[in-house]
Image: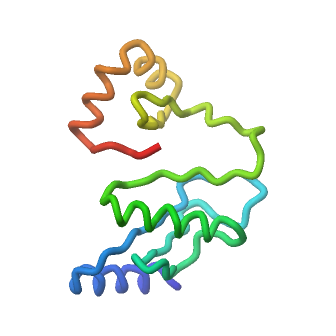
Amino acid sequence: MTNEQLLDLARELNAGGAAYALVTVVRVLAPTSAYLGAQAIVLADGTLHGWIGGGCAKDVVITAAQGAIGSGEPKLVRISNDALHPEEDIERYEGVSYYFCCDGCRTTFQKDPRKYAAIHHASSGRVAA
C-alpha cells in the first residue's frame, strides 16, 4: 500500500467517523524487516492496512493499536527479541516514557522531572509507556 493510498484510506475513515490507529515505525535496530517511517492503519476489528514489519511484530502492533483505539490514548510500543539493547534515551517518570534528542535535554529533565513533565503534559499530551 502506497503512502497516498494510506492517506486516502485515512480520509475515508475520518469522513465515516470510523475508529482507527495510524501506526508509524519510529526506531529500528537490526535485525528487522521493518524500516524507519513505515506506516499502517489498524482498524478497531484488527484489520491492518499497510506494512510495519513481519513476524511477531504484526500481532503485537495490532493488539497495541486496538488498545490505543479503545482508550483514545497514543501508545508507544517497543518490540525486541533481546535485552541487549537497553533504551538508553528514555526516562520514565510517573508511568510515562520521555524520549530525548540529546544528552543535554535528558540531563536537564533528570534534574527536575516534575517541572518538565508538567510542561510536556500541557503542551503535547501523555505518551503511554
Q: Quadrant of residue 98?
A: top left
The colour scheme of the drawn protein is: rainbow
Residue 26 appears left or right of 83: left
Residue 105 drawn above or below residue 45: above
Position in image of residue 58 (x %, y %): 62, 70
At a point 59% along the width and 60% down the height, the residue shown is 36
Position in image of residue 24 (x %, y %): 49, 63
Q: How many marks?
A: 0
Residue 74 appears left or right of 88: left
- Foreground of the two, 19 or 102: 19
At a point 29% along the width and 34% down the height, the residue shown is 120
- Foreground of the two, 94 or 102: 94
Residue 114 drawn above or below residue 120: above
Q: Residue furthest top?
A: 111
Position in image of residue 88 (x %, y %): 62, 31
Residue 60 drawn above or below residue 81: below
- Foreground of the two, 79 or 109: 79
Residue 83 appears left or right of 105: right
At a point 46% along the width and 37% down the height, the residue shown is 97
Position in image of residue 67 (x %, y %): 43, 62
At a point 27% along the width and 37% down the height, the residue shown is 121
